[in-house]
Amino acid sequence: MMINIGKKTQNIIKRDKKVMFTTTREHYPFVAERASGDYAYDIEGNRFIDFSSFISVYNFGGNGTAAVRKAVKDQVDKLMHAAFLDYYSELPVRFAENLLTMFPKGFGRVFLSNSGTEANEDAIKLAKLFTKKSYIVGFINAFHGRSLGALGITATKLVHREHYGPFPNVVHAIYPNYYRDQFNTSSPEEHALACIDHLEKVIMAKEYSPREIAAIFVEPIQGEGGYIVPPKIFMKELRRIATENNIVLVSDEVQAGYMRTGKFLAMDNFGVTADIYTMAKAIGGGLPLGATIASRSLGDTPAGSHAGTFGGNLASVAAANATLNHLKKNKRLIESMVKRKNRIMMKRLNELKENYEIVGDVRGLGMMLAIEIVKNKKSKDHGIKERDAIIEKCFYEGLLLLPAGTSAIRIIPPITINENVLEKGLNLLDDAIKKTSAK
């Protein structure tokens, strides 16, 4: 059934453009009103299948569970803001204790903030403090946030960085993407090792001494960069390099963590343990929360060296703690859901790749998947207009999708999505690609 966009939507967008700075709300005219489970609803009352989880925030269904909403309401009636980083409060401590049970042995320090960007800023400061070194290694196509420190490590799109520099001491290495292999190697693993060689034999041998590198920041799966999944050997080699050179390995789990790949920590898919993890998005259950979690062996921060006003906000932490309790109670069921729905989604997406010339690549882990749209399979030229047309067609048929990278479409429905609804959404995507391919 076609989505009808009326005067309510048009009026809100018109008002928005008068008073708000432009951000990324340009793909289609969706004005959110409410969400429930598998569906999102706009101001006109239109219902959409949600394949975005509101940017991977509602991993367990739109607007969270009833228990999460009750926890927030109960906390709001008592105290919303406790200035936790200046005063003590039990709820954030209880949440940190609860959170640390999900991490490897030896992790014992948590810093709470308000977003993934802040969580990464915190990790930058901690790495420099703990190592007394100054340079950071990031990766091409990485996204870690838009404040200056996190933006310095980000290298996804020029528009993110243009006119905002100069940036802190950051160098960008090559992240493995075998679909677009610039080394002309014979396998994903060989390509990954070529990337490691470039890091060690060029960057660390000719530009930045490892004696001056504080941290390597890496996404287990590149998110905004296009849902790129590296071979396991790449992460294992980064771990080796970090260990040999007293460099802190930071895993940005903001989008890929919290069961999105079928594991609480996406880095666990590679058999690697980082020194610092950053989390946000789904961790807050729908409210703003970032967390930076470090190995106890790294040390602690001096009093007054790092803090903030709203970190550990009680309403957000109440939502986070209730969400985490739900996850822990249902962990085996959630793991099973992700595996089963991954099989359903990968089967259909690979069929799209087989059937349509403009679907160049299918990739991802768990329920963090993407298709890359190209002009044709031979050239692999990015199909940006085609990608945008597909997303728009899906919107007007009642399916919410988001772009990623240069010409990819990310598919990140709630982990709890009903399988019949999942199939219906995949059918709508198939139809949109078919219509776009026919032009």
Image (spheres, rainbow, N blue to C red):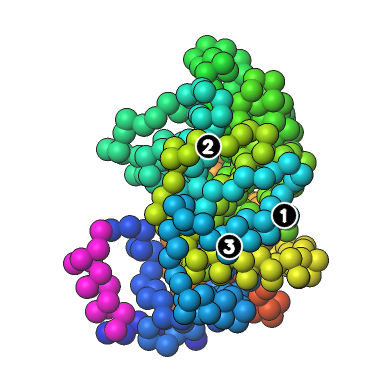
Q: Label 1 amino acid?
A: Met
Q: On the rendered structure, is 335 left or right of 15?
A: right
Residue lying at 58% horizontally and 64% vertically, measured from the top left: 91
Q: Secondary structure at mark 1?
A: loop
Q: Position of residue 124 (x, y in %)?
A: 49, 36
Q: Position of residue 341 (x, y in %)?
A: 73, 67
Residue lying at 69% horizontally and 44% vertically, measured from the top left: 107
Name the front one of labels 2 and 3: 3
Q: On the rendered structure, is 242 left or right of 438?
A: right
- Is residue 293 magenta-colored? no
Identify the residue under disc 1.
102
Residue lying at 27% horizontally and 77% vertically, measured from the top left: 12
Q: What is the chief secondary structure element of the magenta stretch?
A: helix
Task: Classify residue 173 by image quadrant.
Answer: top right
Q: Secondary structure at mark 2?
A: loop
Label total for image:
3
Q: On the rendered structure, is 149 left or right of 218?
A: left
Mark 2 vs 3, N-terminal side? 3
Q: Are marks 2 and 3 in contact (CB under 8 Å)?
A: no
Mark 1 vs 2, N-terminal side? 1
Q: Is residue 386 visible?
A: no
Identify the residue under disc 2.
301
Q: Label 2 amino acid?
A: Thr
Identify the residue under disc 3.
90
The magenta segment = 8-21
Name the front one of labels 1 and 3: 3
Mark 1 vs 3, N-terminal side? 3
Q: Label 3 amino acid?
A: Glu
Q: Position of residue 162 (x, y in %)?
A: 31, 39
